[in-house]
Image (spheres, grey):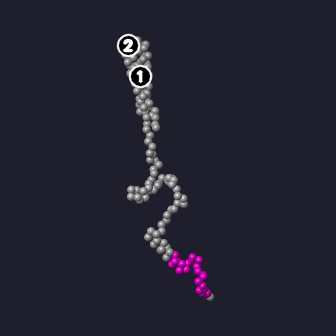
Amino acid sequence: MAVKINSPHIMPPNAEPAGRQEQAAAAAREQKDETAAGGILDEYTKSEPSDAKPSGLYRFEQDEHGNRKLVFDDPKKDTRTCTGNTDQVDREIRKLKEKAQQLEQQIQAASGDEEKKAALEKKLAQVKSELSQKDNDTYRRQHTIFS
């Protein structure tokens, strides 16, 4: 024996009445039409006005035509400049060269006194060895003052 029920209140669990499906489809079409026409767009609105500088790497600016453009601030691009100063090293080298020249002149002048000549030659050898240690690029780089 089969029983037929004609009640509109009894339906399968995942079925919707035909009227509701048509209403949902019509609402979706209306929303799509408004969005396409430029009526509804998502937009971020700040809760509090702030004049603080943006915290991110990107910021908005205006170009020459007044249009908004997105600008990227590169943290690797450093605007500070650094200069190296080797004046102190150059002065040391110049003084050593002058001292070596003076010792050579004193050696030539002391032609008769062998003890004095030997002592001056010993000093000259020390000055020349110090000069050879300081008069090169490595020493200059190590003793450069940066500001």
User: Which residue lies most toward the top here?
Assistant: 112
Whether 96 is drawn above or below 15: the answer is above
Residue occupied by mark 2: 111
Give 144 or 42, whichever is nearer the viewer: 42
Secondary structure of the residue carrying tag 2 is loop
Observer able to see residue 132: no
- In the displayed structure, would residue 85 be above or below residue 24? above
Q: Secondary structure at mark 1?
A: helix
Query: Would residue 9 be visible to someone looking at this image?
Result: yes
In the rendering, at what x and y percent does residue 42 appear?
49, 65
Comparing 94 with 46, the one in front is 46
Residue at 45% x, 34% y is: 144
Quarter-of-image position of residue 88:
top left
What residue lies at 43% left-to-right and 13% top-to-bottom? 115
Which residues make up the magenta segment? 2-25
Specify whether 7 is left or right of 61. Answer: right
The residue at 54%/78% (across/down) is 20
Residue 5: which quarter of the image? Answer: bottom right
51 or 77: nearer the viewer = 51
| Depicted 64 relative to depicted 104: above or below | below
Q: Position of residue 45 (x, y in %)?
A: 51, 62
Dots 2, 1 in contact, CB < 8 A? no
Q: CA distance from mark 2 to mark 1?
A: 19 Å
Residue 99's disc is 1
* Main secondary structure of the magenta stretch: loop
Q: Looking at the picture, how far across and down is residue 50, in whole percent? A: 52, 56
Task: Tell me the residue at 44%/16% (across/down).
Answer: 119
- In the picture, the quarter occupied by the N terminus is bottom right
The residue type indicated by label 2 comes to Ser
- Please name which of the two marks, 2 or 1, marks the residue nearer to the observer: 1
Based on the picture, tell me whether residue 3 belongs to the magenta stretch: yes
The answer to if 131 sits in the magenta stretch is: no
